[in-house]
Image (cartoon, rainbow, N blue to C red):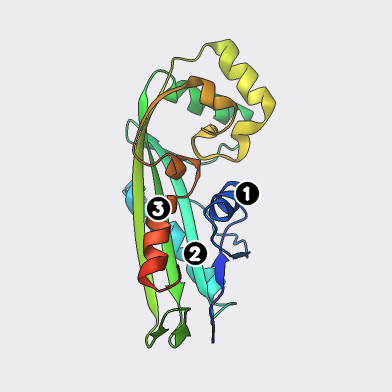
Amino acid sequence: MTATLVLASASPRRQELLRNAGIPFVVQPTDIPEIPREGESAKACAERLAREKALAVFRDWPKDLILGADTIVVVDGEMLGKPRDAEDAARMLRLLSGRTHQVTTGVCLVGPSGLRTENRQLTTGFEDTRSETTLVTMHPLTDDDILFYVSTGEPMDKAGAYAIQGIASRWISRIEGDYFNVVGLPVALVCRMLRERGMT
């Protein structure tokens, strides 16, 4: 059998990043609760959620290669996922204002036994989970900045309540690491993982 890459995410950002990198895929979203466990680090949480998403889709697509991903923003040890509402988004932005924070994306590839790729045959099933972390520095935000930004609706489905590639780009002064990781998918890491499986 020839494998299809299935993205276990409804995120339009992740889909756009894969398309821009020339990686063919289909989409099968999951509904995994994105809740950290007590005492769990951001890295461990992002990798666990990416794995859970990939495995959930793999149950319905057992002949294909599944890519799961999860992005978490961390400031002062507090993990920031997607805001619950406008008030929560404003709270997160106040925490990030004038600070440097971490963005960690966990990625997981899952595939079956007997997976055939373009280049080779894999005789055993596999599960490969990794992560990437980027440091992001945000300019100080005024109350008016935060009010305006929340009113646009852009923060509402983003980890940490901002989109580096969107309106929030006006306040990002520095990044250290993979920019695309902050958008939602560390493309270079994913490509390395796919290449190791003979997919690119």
**At 49% across and 35% down in the image, what residue appears?**
160
Left or right side of 26 for 49: left
- Return the residue found at the far right: 152
Residue under numbered circle 3:
188
Quarter of the N terminus within the rendering: bottom right
Secondary structure of the residue carrying numbered label 2: strand
Q: Marks 1 and 2: in contact by CB < 8 Å?
A: no
Depicted 17 relative to depicted 120: above or below: above
Name the residue nearer the viewer: 51 or 177: 177
User: CB of mark 3 within 8 Å of CB of mark 1?
Assistant: no
- Residue 68, percent across and down? 49, 61
Residue 182 shows up from this direction: yes
**Amino acid type assigned to the residue bearing label 1 in the image:** Pro
Give above or below for 28 relative to 150: below
Spatial CA span between label 3 and label 1: 18 Å
Residue to which mark 1 is pinned: 12
Residue 182: quarter of image:
top left
User: Where is residue 153 shown, x and y percent of the image?
Assistant: 67, 31
Which tag, 2 or 1, sits closer to the chain's start? 1
- Vertical position of residue 74 compared to residue 200: above or below: above
> For this rendering, which residue is in front, 121 or 173?
121
Q: Residue 67's mark?
A: 2
Q: Secondary structure at mark 3?
A: helix
Residue 181 is marked as none
* Alpha carbon separation for disc pair 3 and 2: 14 Å
Pick the residue in front: 82 or 134. Answer: 134
Amino acid at the residue labelled 2: Leu
* Residue found 43% across the figure and 44% down from its top: 181
Q: Earlier in the sequence, mark 3 or mark 2?
A: 2
Q: Callout 1: helix, strand or loop? A: helix
> For the image shown, how many numbered marks are present on the structure?
3
Answer with mark 3 or mark 1, whichever residue precedes in sequence.
1
